[in-house]
Image (cartoon, rainbow, N blue to C red):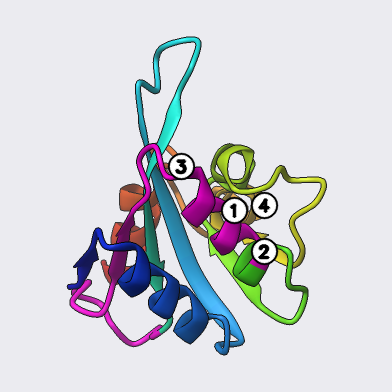
Amino acid sequence: MPYLTESDAMMNAIDHFSHFPILWLDTEVADYDSKTPRLSLIQILADSTDLTGERVTILDVLDRPDLTDYFITKIMLVDRIEKVFHNASYDCKFLGGKSQVKKITCTLELAKKVPYYIAPLANYQLKTVVELGYT
C-alpha cells in the first residue's frame, strides 16, 4: 500500500488514477470535531477485486491545498470518472463540494434503500455493510 508524502509522487499518482473509469475513495480528516477540520488523507483504490487493501494508495495532503486542488481538478470534477464513497456528502465537503463534484456513488445511500428484510443491518457503517456481504 503506497503512502505518498512527496508532491511529485502524489501528482504522478493523481495523473495515473485520472485514467480509470471508477475510483473507490475515502478521506480522513484532522481536527474533525473542531470548527476547522482539515483534510488529512485521500485514499484511492482503482481495483475492485482488491479485498485486502494492498492496492490502496494514500495521499498525505494535510495542509497541502495545492495537492488537494490538483486532485479535485483531475479527479473530482471529471464526469467520466465514477467516484464511489461510503459517505459522499461528508467526503465531498473536503473535495470540491457536492454540488460541483461530478458522477458520485454513495454506498451509504444505496444501503439505506435496501429493505430490512433483504439486508438486516444493525447500522449503516461501512464495516457492517461489508460484513453482511460476506456472511
The answer to whether 28 appears left or right of 89 in the picture is: left
Q: Earlier in the sequence, mark 3 or mark 1?
A: 1
Q: Are marks 1 and 2 in contact (CB under 8 Å)?
A: yes
Secondary structure state at the residue bearing disc 3:
loop
Bounds of the magenta segment: 47-73
State if disc 1 and disc 3 touch (CB < 8 Å).
Answer: no
**Residue situated in front as seen by the camera: 80 or 132:** 80
Quarter of the image that includes the C terminus: bottom left
Mark 4 or 2, closer to the camera: 2
Q: Circle 1 is placed at which residue position?
A: 69
Q: Is residue 91 found left or right of 50 in the rendered image? A: right
The mark found on residue 73 in the picture is 2
Residue 135 among magenta residues: no
Give the residue at x 56% y 40%.
Answer: 94
Is residue 61 one of those drawn in magenta?
A: yes
For label 3, the crowd category at 10 Å Cα-Cα, with few meaning under 14, some 14 to 19 and many 20 or more, is some
Whole-angstrom CA distance, mark 1 to mark 4, is 33 Å
Q: Which residue is mark 3?
A: 124
Q: Amino acid at mark 1?
A: Asp
**Sequence-wise first label, 4 or 3:** 4
Residue 86 visible somewhere in the drawing: no
Q: Is residue 66 above or below residue 43?
A: above
Q: Which residue is mark 4?
A: 113
Amino acid at the residue labelled 2: Thr
Instruction: Tell which tag, 3 or 1, sits nearer the viewer.
Output: 1
Front-most of residues 29 and 8: 8
Task: Estimate the x, y position of residue 47 in percent, counting from the top left.
Answer: 38, 85
Judged from the image, the secondary structure of the residue bearing numbered disc 1 is: helix
Q: Is residue 30 above or below residue 87?
A: above
Q: Earlier in the sequence, mark 4 or mark 2?
A: 2
Q: Is residue 28 above or below residue 5?
A: above
Q: Is residue 72 left or right of residue 17?
A: right
